Image: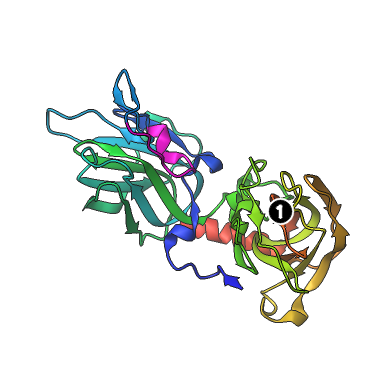
Amino acid sequence: MDDLSTPADFSTLADLASRTFGGGIVEVNDEFFAAADHLLSPAPPVFAPHTFDHRGQVYDGWETRRRREPGHDYAIVRLGAPGVIRGIDVDTSFFTGNFPPYASVDGCSVPGYPDAAQLRAATWTPLVSRSPLTGDSRNLFTVDDKRRFTHVRLTIYPDGGVARLRVHGEVVPDPGLLPEVFDVAAAEYGAHVTGCSDMFYGHPQKMLMPGLAASMGDGWETSRRRDDGNDWVIVQLAAPAVLELADLDTRHFKGNSPGRASLRGVDARAGSVDDPTGWFDLLEPVRLARDTPHRFRIAPAPAATHVRLDIFPDGGMARLRLHGRPDGPGAAAMRSRFDALS
C-alpha cells in the first residue's frame, strides 16, 4: 500500500499555481527572451540545445534581458486554486549561466479578479525572503504562513531565467462560490488521494484533476496483477457530502481498462478510515467498458468524508468525479475554515 496521507515533502501537494487549475500571469515587468507563461506549465521543463530564434536560444521558461542598471524583475501570478501555501519550488532547470542568483516570493489575498494596478497596490506578505538560487536545479523553500492566498509575486535579483514556479499547498475554495451540488472529489476544490494499492504507471491524484484526460498517461494506472486481489484508491473529499452521481472515465484505456469497479464510503468523523466495519456501499461492482466515460447514480447512503474506488482486477482510470451535496456540518466546516484562513 502507498500511504499518501502524510506527504514526505510539500512537493507532493497540489500546485496551486498550475495552468491546469487556471493559474495565470497577471503582470510581468520583462520577458524579453522567454514568456513568463512558461512558469506555470504543468509539464516538466525541456531543453533543445542550439535552437535559436530571432531573440536567441529558445528556453522553456521565463527569461528577462540582462540589466544594465540597478533593479530587479518580477512576475505576478494568479493562483488557479487559492489556498494555504506549504512550499515553493523555484525551478531553474537548464538555466546555467543565466539563472538569477537570488529570488524572493510574496503573497497576497485579494477577492474577485483584480487587475495589475490593484495588485500592485495590495498588501503583500513575504513568503520566501530574498534567498540564493542554484542554477539548473529545483530550489525548494518551505512556507510557514497559514493564511489563504490568491496571488504570489516572484521577484528575481537582478535578472535571468526561471523554468517553472511551483506553489504547493492545500486548496481552500470559497464556499460562497460553490453550487449546492458539486464534484467533491475535484482536486481544484481540495479533494486529495490519501492511499492506494499501486500507482506503477500513473499517480491516482491525476484522476481528480480538471478537464478531460489528454492521454493514457494523464490518469491512474496500476501494474498487471498476477494474484487474486484487486487495486484500489482512497480519496478524501473536499467536504463531507451525500453523494448523488459518480463518473468513472476509462477514456484512452483500451487494452488496460478495469473489468469492473465499485465505490464505498466512510464518515471518518464518526470512526476511522482504517476500521473496515465503518465502510458502506455507494456503488455495487459494475462492468466497465474500455475507453468510455461512465455515469452511475449513487444508492442512498449517509454522508461520506472518504470514498474508496476498487477496480477489478487492475488497470487504468482517467478521471473520477463524485457529485454530491455537503451535509450541514460539512458545509459549516468549509465556511469556518475559509473564514479562519482568509
Which quadrant holds the N terminus?
Answer: bottom right
Which residue is rendered at x = 71% and y = 44% of the image?
252
Total residue callouts: 1
Q: Please state the extent of the stretch shown in magenta in the rendering.
A: 36-49
Residue 330 place in picture, x, y as percent: 67, 63
Please, is residue 298 above or below residue 265 in the view? above
> Quarter of the image holding residue 21?
top right
Extreme-front residue of the structure: 226
Pick the residue in front: 309 or 47. 47
Q: Is residue 43 magenta?
A: yes
Image-based side of 320 in relation to 299, left or right: left
Q: Is residue 65 magenta?
A: no
Quick one: label 1, few (<14), some, or many (20+) residues within 10 Å?
many
Image-based side of 285 in relation to 279, left or right: right
Residue 290 place in picture, x, y as percent: 80, 48
Residue 86 place in picture, x, y as percent: 41, 59
Residue identifier under label 1: 317
From this viewpoint, is residue 115 visible? yes
Which residue is rendered at x = 31% and y = 45% of the image?
92
SS majority, magenta = loop
| Residue kind at label 1, given as amino acid type | Met
